[in-house]
């Protein structure tokens, strides 16, 4: 009996510079949707970096929920316009209004602390705050990538852009909080 070959992440199907959208449509690797999904993936990674750098006692639950939300956003963004209805009726998770409300509540919670800041922030007070700033700027880039998809025929639900906009606001506030350890609370 011949041994079966183990599964490999290396499919070699992208060696010629193309990749697949969610339901199999092949597109160039520099396609706007692939750029958007790639930027969302970078945001997920930068949030993981921030999570790893958080000081002892700082709760990672909020960051982890955003990471799970980003996986849902990536799934929705990674399907062709012709497959949007298919995705909407699939088993895949999708962001909804309560997800946006959760981010808004987190923003409101941090704003209610009266975090101190004057003028434009200069990142780098400590590794954790700097990592949150990297995540924030990546969130802003992801937001721009999503907005740009409309010009390429991919119409996304406005909730996705709103969510990224609020996440970047939240990350800015979290970075301000991280600059002052006396203002730390669970995020």
Image (cartoon, helix red, strand yellow):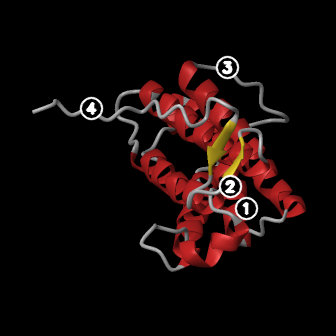
- Residue at mark 1 to residue at mark 4: CA–CA distance: 39 Å
CB under 8 Å between discs 1 and 2: yes
**Circle 1 residue:** 161
Q: In the rendered view of the protein, which quadrant contains the N terminus? A: top left
- Residue at mark 4 to residue at mark 2: CA–CA distance: 38 Å
Question: Which mark's residue is nearer the viewer, 4 or 2?
Answer: 4
**Circle 3 residue:** 124
Q: Tell me the crowding category of disc 3: few under 14, some 14 to 19, or many 20 or more residues within 10 angstroms, Cα based.
A: some
Question: Which mark's residue is nearer the viewer, 3 or 1?
Answer: 1
The answer to whether 41 is drawn above or below residue 105 in the figure is above
Question: Which mark's residue is nearer the viewer, 1 or 4?
Answer: 4
**Circle 4 residue:** 6
- Residue at mark 4 to residue at mark 3: CA–CA distance: 44 Å
> Reading the chain from its start, which is encountered first: label 1 or label 4?
4
Q: Is residue 169 left or right of residue 105?
A: right
Q: Tell me the crowding category of disc 2: few under 14, some 14 to 19, or many 20 or more residues within 10 angstroms, Cα based.
A: many
> Reading the chain from its start, which is encountered first: label 2 or label 3?
3
**Circle 2 residue:** 164
């Amino acid at each position: 009996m011949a041994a079966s070959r183990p599964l490999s992440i290396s499919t070699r199907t992208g060696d010629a510079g193309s990749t697949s959208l969610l339901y199999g449509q092949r597109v160039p690797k520099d396609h706007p949707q692939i750029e958007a999904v790639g930027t969302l993936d970078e945001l997920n990674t930068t949030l993981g970096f921030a999570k790893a750098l958080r000081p002892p006692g700082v709760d990672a639950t909020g960051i982890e929920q955003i990471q799970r939300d980003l996986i849902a956003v990536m799934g929705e963004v990674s399907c062709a316009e012709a497959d949007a209805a298919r995705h909407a009726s699939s088993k895949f998770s999708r962001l909804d209004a309560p997800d946006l409300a959760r981010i808004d509540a987190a923003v409101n919670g941090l704003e209610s602390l009266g975090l101190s800041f004057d003028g434009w922030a200069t990142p780098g007070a400590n590794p954790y705050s700097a990592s949150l700033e990297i995540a924030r700027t990546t969130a802003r880039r992801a937001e721009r990538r999503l907005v740009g998809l409309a010009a390429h025929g991919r119409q996304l639900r406005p909730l996705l852009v709103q969510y990224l906009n609020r996440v970047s606001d939240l990350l800015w506030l979290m970075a301000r909080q991280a600059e002052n350890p006396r203002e730390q609370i669970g995020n």
